[in-house]
Amino acid sequence: MHMEPAQRAPLSVDALIALLRKTFDYFRHEANPANGLVKDNTRKDSHSSITAVGLGLACFPVAAERGYIGRAEVVDRVLATLRFFQESEQSVARTSGNQRTRGALKATTHTT
């Protein structure tokens, strides 16, 4: 027996804008401004991943264009992230900072 998915009304423009803002707020709150690592979720001691970091990097310029954040803060956060990866061990071996370039990143994702 084939069942059709539940039909939902399309989101309004206001609802989409609110969702955009809430999505940005997640990345702003869960990213460590010192190194750019973004927690994969809001659980305590959550790991970071290159996917979460990449999505965070992509959202900051959009947020600046929408006026949610200043361009100077975007530049600071992006450069901190790029510098972190540039200065990190470039292998799959764990380093003293516990960062890795593949898989989960368990480094300082704590934000204050």
Image: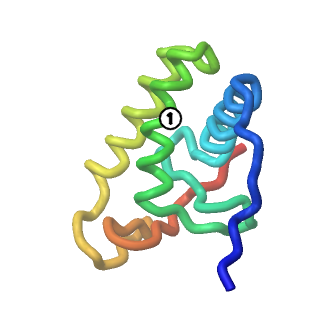
Q: Is residue 7 left or right of residue 34?
A: right
Instruction: Between residue 15 and residue 104, name the one nearer to us.
Output: 15
Quarter in which the C terminus is drawn? top right
- Residue at 41% in and 59% down: 50
- Residue at 37% in and 48% down: 84
Amino acid on which the number 1 mark rests in the picture: Cys
Image label count: 1
- Where does the image place residue 32, in percent across and percent down from the top left? 57, 45
Vertical placement of 52 versus 103: above or below?
A: above
Vertical placement of 14 versus 54: above or below?
A: above
- Where does the image place residue 8, in percent across and percent down from the top left? 76, 49
Mark 1 secondary-structure assignment: helix
Q: What residue occupies the far left of the structure in this picture?
A: 90
Q: What residue occupies the far bottom of the structure in this picture?
A: 1
User: Residue beneath label 1, please?
Assistant: 59
Quarter in which the N terminus is drawn? bottom right
Vertical placement of 25 versus 73: above or below?
A: below
Q: Is residue 29 left or right of residue 82?
A: right
- Residue at 23% in and 64% down: 90
